[in-house]
Image (tube, grey):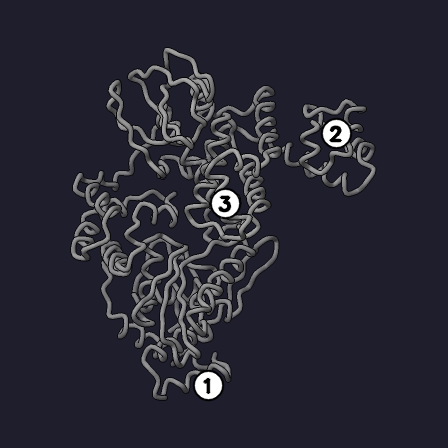
């Protein structure tokens, strides 16, 4: 109890709690009158109520809720991302083993047998343990505890009193975690702390490592995590690393009623993805995963496709061979699960981080939709029709930009102006509720969602960061977008597309538009809310493409 009060800035009330014999098991039963007696100061009352609220959520959790972390829809098996795989063969068991979670090395290595083995990622290198051994661990989880934990993850009953106590203890462990101390106890964690002290931003790999350390810590202690626990851990990360964003590690789930797509959206973020992957890997290793049916339209990848995927993970040239292996492995990408995020997609297909990405995305798009157009001709025809139908929507400033189309400027500059004007010709009308506030995007917000304009290449990094902060503050995820560089729209010289943390330089404005549109579909990314009507207009009238998942937006479905 003392530690709990200290971690919530209530250490000066320890004597009051001892005098009244308040222990964690009765904390949730405190009434308002009790709180006012224990905490004369209003600030302390608020802190204590916040603590009680956090703890009370544990009583409402069922194990089936925890299982929902692993399955978005019944019958869909989540994709497992196993990082830093350490293959291992032993004389006793020739099976190749993969890392499941991190653990301190045991002082005594047990005798191996023919059962499943776990490779434990430690500071001193991998070690092995058997789930059933002839000797006893002197440190680390026992086989019985692993089996007990794994079996409890598959239970569907509502927590009874004993389970509530366990869940409450799990929540207390999360609240009381001292993240700095945890990182100081780990070699890689100390490196991350040193980076934070030097005001260096964490990289993509650093964030993965940080998430691995935290999730492994709780798995090794057989502690279950729910959404509120992972949200609390994300807050602790931001407290230690001030430049980090909470939404990088945890984004709350969205109910169907509040979803922009009229579908429920599961919680996202590095921490929860890591927890899903590691718990599922543990279940799978123990053979207690839920049986799932493979959809009839999913093809089992051929050996040739798997070999091509492996080749693409280790080679980036020559271009002709890259295209051959990308073609051979198309069915693997086409049949990926709905839980596969953009980040995970890049992990599986790192070849997309190279200069070949536009060609590779173009191939997959053609295979998926059988659409083949001349983007230059299709876009110019579309814009002329749109301008004829909606010219009255243009403001005086827009009209000035329109006049530049008749001057001696480059074709790229003309196309940049045309894309810029689309948001004025078709202003947004939709609104949504974000963080209990109604948001109706302006024409400028719609334009910036589709296309950013910066003056010099040096401004690109700051522009990307501002956009990231803008979306994080609204609680939204960032979708692919274009960036044009030049002193004015009438004099643009460089063209980029930003996808997740990756920036691609394209040869022209329309090639950037083409790549940005196609990458949305190939990576199954959503259109950003503020400019989704513009993307649908481009999809329907430039690419002449309609899909069963398209939203119905009446004011753009018949613009001509």
First in residue order: circle 2 vs circle 1:
2
Q: Do tag 3 and tag 1 residues touch (Cβ < 8 Å)?
A: no
Quadrant showing the C terminus: bottom left
Q: Nearer the viewer, residue 185 or 332?
A: 185
Q: Which residue is mark 3?
A: 249
First in residue order: circle 2 vs circle 3:
2
Secondary structure at badge 2 equals loop
Q: Which residue is mark 1?
A: 400
Secondary structure at badge 1 equals helix
Secondary structure at badge 3 equals helix
Q: Is residue 237 left or right of residue 399?
A: right
Few, some or many C-alpha atoms within 10 Å of disc 2 (few <14, some 14-19, many ≥20)?
Answer: few
Few, some or many C-alpha atoms within 10 Å of disc 3 (few <14, some 14-19, many ≥20)?
Answer: many
Residue 379 occupies quadrant: bottom left
**Image coordinates for residue 12, horizontal then vertical, percent:** 77, 34
Quadrant showing the N terminus: top right
Residue 30 shows which numbered tag?
2
The residue positioned 64% from the left and 36% from the top of the image is 54
């Amino acid at each position: 109890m003392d530690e709990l009060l200290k971690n919530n800035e209530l250490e000066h009330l320890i004597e009051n709690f001892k005098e009244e014999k308040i222990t964690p098991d009765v904390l949730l039963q405190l009434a308002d009158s009790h709180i006012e007696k224990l905490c004369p100061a209003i600030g302390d009352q608020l802190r204590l109520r916040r603590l009680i609220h956090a703890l009370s959520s544990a009583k409402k959790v069922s194990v089936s809720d925890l299982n929902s972390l692993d399955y978005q829809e019944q019958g869909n098996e989540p994709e497992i991302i196993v990082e830093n795989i350490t293959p291992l063969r032993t004389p006793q068991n020739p099976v190749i083993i993969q890392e499941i979670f991190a653990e301190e090395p045991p002082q005594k290595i047990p005798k191996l047998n023919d059962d499943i083995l776990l490779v434990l990622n430690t500071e001193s290198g991998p070690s092995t343990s058997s789930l059933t051994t002839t000797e006893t661990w002197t440190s680390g989880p026992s086989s019985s505890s692993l089996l007990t934990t794994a079996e409890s993850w598959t239970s569907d009953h509502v927590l009874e009193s004993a389970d509530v106590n366990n869940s409450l203890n799990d929540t207390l462990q999360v609240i009381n975690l001292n993240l700095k101390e945890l990182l100081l106890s780990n070699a890689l964690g100390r490196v991350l702390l040193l980076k934070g002290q030097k005001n260096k931003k964490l990289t993509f790999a650093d964030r993965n490592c940080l998430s691995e350390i935290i999730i492994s810590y709780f798995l090794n202690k057989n502690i279950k995590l729910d959404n509120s626990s992972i949200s609390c851990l994300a807050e602790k990360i931001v407290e230690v690393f001030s430049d980090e964003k909470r939404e990088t590690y945890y984004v709350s789930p969205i109910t169907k009623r509040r979803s922009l797509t009229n579908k429920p959206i599961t919680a996202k973020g590095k921490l929860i993805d890591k927890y899903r992957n590691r718990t599922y890997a543990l279940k799978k290793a123990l053979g207690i995963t839920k049986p799932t049916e493979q959809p009839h339209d999913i093809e089992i990848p051929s050996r040739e496709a798997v070999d091509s995927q492996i080749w693409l993970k280790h080679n980036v040239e020559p271009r002709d061979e890259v295209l051959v292996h990308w073609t051979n492995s198309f069915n693997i990408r086409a049949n990926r699960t709905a839980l596969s995020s953009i980040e995970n997609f890049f992990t599986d297909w790192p070849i997309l981080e190279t200069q070949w990405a536009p060609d590779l995305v173009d191939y997959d798009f053609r295979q998926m939709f059988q659409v083949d157009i001349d983007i230059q001709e299709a876009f110019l025809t579309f814009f002329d029709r749109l301008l004829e139908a909606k010219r009255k929507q243009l403001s005086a400033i827009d009209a000035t930009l329109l006049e530049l189309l008749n001057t001696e400027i480059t074709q790229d500059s003309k196309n940049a102006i045309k894309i810029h004007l689309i948001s004025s010709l078709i202003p947004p009308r939709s609104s949504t509720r974000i963080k209990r506030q109604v948001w109706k995007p302006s024409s400028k917000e719609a334009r910036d969602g589709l296309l950013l304009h910066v003056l010099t290449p040096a401004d690109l990094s700051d522009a990307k960061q501002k956009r990231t902060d803008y979306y994080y503050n609204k609680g939204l995820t960032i979708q692919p977008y274009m960036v044009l560089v030049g002193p004015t729209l009438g004099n643009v010289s460089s063209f980029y597309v930003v996808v997740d943390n990756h920036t691609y330089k394209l040869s022209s404005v329309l090639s950037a538009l083409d790549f940005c549109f196609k990458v949305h579909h190939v990576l199954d990314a959503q259109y950003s809310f503020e400019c989704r009507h513009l993307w649908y207009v481009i999809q329907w009238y430039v690419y002449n493409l309609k899909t069963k998942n398209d939203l119905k937006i009446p004011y753009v479905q018949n613009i001509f």
